[in-house]
């Protein structure tokens, strides 16, 4: 069967691989959809990821249908629709350096344990929306890391898929007011559609002034000048100006979460940050959130569907990867299988 692999720096190709054969404790999944992640472009640029540099199978945002079930497997039947914890496979991270990737028709899950590797979803949820489960878990982990309290005022920098997923996550956690900040009007319009209370275009508006208007003045502290009464900031943009901006905006006791990948070192004024006692937390992957987010996707799949901008057939998966890595060309690209 055909599989998409990184075969060298900035080179992605079709590779012929054997269809997996299952054992008594395994499940074979027919992949029905797989999202394209920004990390796929990173893996491509560097030529793979250890231990498979030069031959890395791609695809780590899958949704699939159970195609075969081993004799000793309980809890799953042929035809079940499922989402996958791609960090728990026994042969490595799916599509992120492991032996398999989900940009291929079939993936085998070895030694399946219900509640650990797979979670069933209703058949009415579209495959491409189900494939958002993995990135939405990333977003929910970022939300959880910032520990928002009910009634919190939140500012999210970056209206890409993770930022929009965090918007939905903060709303579930009881945030009272959520502002989304970006430089692209189309992204900001989508944020409003999905449920942002307000948006800020940082190319035409002053972020500090607008946040003061939207969230009010913070109580006095060691910081004497007026600062927004924003409780939580989330960096889902990955540009240095975001943490630098937050470091001079944050009120006493605010939290900044970093979920975006920064490709260059960021310089921060620690003396200035000291005054606000800003808490900075970091978010990577989804230690517990992979199936926590599933029920909300099932219940609100039409809202999540708005995050997807492009749906590309599997036979054009190489084009989908190129589209996703082209700045400004697409928001969220999903590969769909027949």
Image (cartoon, helix red, strand yellow):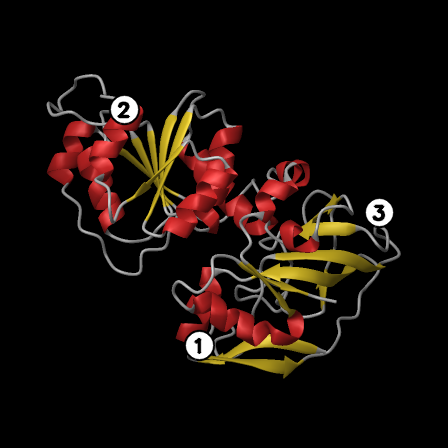
Residue 2: x and y in percent read 68, 78
Which tag, 2 or 3, sits closer to the chain's start? 3
Q: Residue at x 39, y 24 (%)?
A: 152
Foreground disc of the pair 3, 1: 1
Contact (Cβ within 8 Å) of mark 1 with mark 2: no
Residue 120: x and y in percent read 75, 45
Residue 223: x and y in percent read 13, 25
Q: CA distance from mark 1 to mark 2?
A: 44 Å
204 vs 36, nearest the viewer: 204
**Residue pointed to by mark 2:** 229
Looking at the image, residue 306 lies above or below residue 171? below
31 vs 314, nearest the viewer: 314
Contact (Cβ within 8 Å) of mark 3 with mark 1: no
Disc 3 on helix, strand or loop? loop
167 vs 187, nearest the viewer: 187
Q: CA distance from mark 2 to mark 3?
A: 51 Å
Confirm whether residue 286 shows in the render.
no
Which tag, 1 or 2, sits closer to the chain's start? 1
Disc 1 on helix, strand or loop? loop
In the rendered structure, find residue 74 and report the number of the disc placed on it.
3
Quadrant that contains the C terminus: bottom right
Looking at the image, residue 330 lies above or below residue 216? below
Residue 127: x and y in percent read 69, 54
Is 186 positioned to the left or the right of 273 in the image? Answer: right
**Residue pointed to by mark 1:** 47
Quadrant that contains the N terminus: bottom right
Q: Residue at x 68, y 50 (%)?
A: 83
Is 11 positioned to the left or the right of 263 in the image? Answer: right
257 vs 233, nearest the viewer: 233
Q: Residue at x 49, y 30 (%)?
A: 171
């Amino acid at each position: 069967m055909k599989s998409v692999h990184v075969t060298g720096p900035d080179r992605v190709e079709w590779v012929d691989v054997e269809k997996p054969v299952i054992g008594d404790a395994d499940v074979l999944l027919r992949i029905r959809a797989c999202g394209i992640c920004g990390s796929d472009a990173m893996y491509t640029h560097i030529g793979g990821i250890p231990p498979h540099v030069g031959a890395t199978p791609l695809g780590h945002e899958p949704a699939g249908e159970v195609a075969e079930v081993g004799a000793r497997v309980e809890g799953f039947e042929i035809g079940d629709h499922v989402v996958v914890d791609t960090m728990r496979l026994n042969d490595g991270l799916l599509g992120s350096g492991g032996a398999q990737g989900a940009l291929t028709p079939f993936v085998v899950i070895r030694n399946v344990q219900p509640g650990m590797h797979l979670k069933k979803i209703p058949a009415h949820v579209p495959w491409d929306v189900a494939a958002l489960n993995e990135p939405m878990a990333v977003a929910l982990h970022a939300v959880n890391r910032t520990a928002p309290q009910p009634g919190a005022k939140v500012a999210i920098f970056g209206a890409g898929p993770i930022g929009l997923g965090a918007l939905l996550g903060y709303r579930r956690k009881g945030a009272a007011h959520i502002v989304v900040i970006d430089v692209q009007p189309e992204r900001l319009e989508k944020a409003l559609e999905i449920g942002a209370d307000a948006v800020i275009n940082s190319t035409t508006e002053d972020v500090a002034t607008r946040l003061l208007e939207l969230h009010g003045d913070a109580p006095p502290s060691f910081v004497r000048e007026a600062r927004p009464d924003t409780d939580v900031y989330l960096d889902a943009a990955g540009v240095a100006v975001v943490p630098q901006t937050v470091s001079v905006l944050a009120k006493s006791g605010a939290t900044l979460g970093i979920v975006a990948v920064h490709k260059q070192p960021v310089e921060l004024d620690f003396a200035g940050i000291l005054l606000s006692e800003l808490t900075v937390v970091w978010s990577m992957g989804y230690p517990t959130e992979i199936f926590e987010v599933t029920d909300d996707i099932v219940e609100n799949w039409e809202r999540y569907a708005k995050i997807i901008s492009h749906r590309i057939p599997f036979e054009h998966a190489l084009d989908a990867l190129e589209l996703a890595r082209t700045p400004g060309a697409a928001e969220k690209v999903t590969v769909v299988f027949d």
